[in-house]
Amino acid sequence: MSDHLAEDFASRYGPWALIAGASEGLGAAFAECLAKQGIHLLLVARRREPLEALARELRAEFGVEVATTPLDVADETALTAFIAAIDVELGLVICNAAYSAVGAFLETPPEQLKQIVGVNVIAPLIMVRLLAPQLKARGKGGVILMSSLAGNQGSANIATYAASKSFNTVLAEGLWLELKRAGVDVIAPCAGAIRTPGYQRAQSGPEAPGTMDATDVAYEALAALGRGPVVVPGRFNRFALFLMRRLLPRKKAIQIMSSSTKGLTS
């Protein structure tokens, strides 16, 4: 796919962007896409080593400033303190950190269920609530709340994860209307399967139909800012969503999604 973004992208969504969940996969793809636009980066993830390795690569290749912070976004106290200490002009906030406990709901420890909610629901709420006022005050900027096709209906084997992604989609839809009057663009990219290290570790069988490269998903999401509130990267995935939401009974859509996730492992 083309890596072309609007000519005014950097001026509208720079000079700095914050990416949570940035050490690998889609988060790293977002970082590279933005670095190519000359946007400086605040990168957050739990693991220090891959985060710092990515930062070194981006500095060397694109000449941008990159600051890294090892952080578990589910730690509300640490996340709030990190946000309070930000002293750069943010133009873009990308909530990409995600956690999914794969397996039957009744066999999943409550601690893991709470971790899903902490990472996928509470952390984006805190990030947007504390950072959006800065975007609103400057009169321009963007927020990306990463969601998933799994959030458009329930799915066995990842029931809580799917529910958390549904939350992000609906939150983005409401914020899209609230914040666009202030010049802040909000979007929820509802991605299908992505070729990330995490997906490849969890997938025991063949790739799901419509599986995309992380860079293509990142560029489609970034290019759709300002056109929100929702974008579905990939032509196949857009067709699949139309089929699942418009043509099939809800029960059948749940069964189809569940059949595609039953091969996932923790």
Image (tube, rainbow, N blue to C red):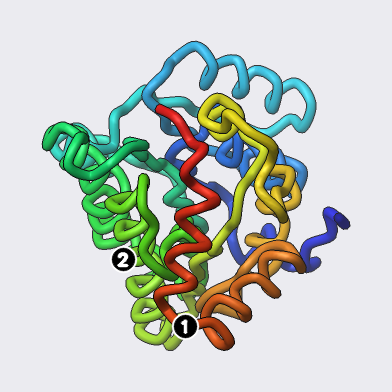
Q: Nearer the viewer, residue 158 or 99?
A: 158
Q: Is residue 190 above or below residue 115?
A: below
Name the kind of residue labelled 1 in the image: Pro
Is residue 47 visible in the rendered image? The answer is: yes
What's the distance in space between the residues labelled 2 and 1, CA to CA? 22 Å
Q: Secondary structure at mark 1?
A: loop
Seen in the picture, residue 126 relative to 32 is either above or below; the reply is below
Q: What residue do we see at 36% from left, 37% from top?
A: 102
Q: Quadrant of the C terminus?
A: top left
Q: Which residue is mark 1?
A: 249
Residue underneath mark 2: 167
Q: Residue 12: x, y in percent? A: 62, 66
What crowding class fits label 1: few (fewer than 14 Cα within 10 Å), some (14-19), or many (20 or more)?
A: few
Q: In the visual, does 182 lie left or right of 228?
A: left
Rendered residue at 36%/63% (across/down): 154
Q: Secondary structure at mark 2?
A: helix
**How far across and how far down the image is residue 260, in percent?**
55, 50
x, y percentage for residue 62?
77, 32
Seen from the viewer's position, the closer of residues 85 and 100 is 100
| Residue 46 screen position, x and y as percent | 37, 24
Residue 90 appearing in the image: no
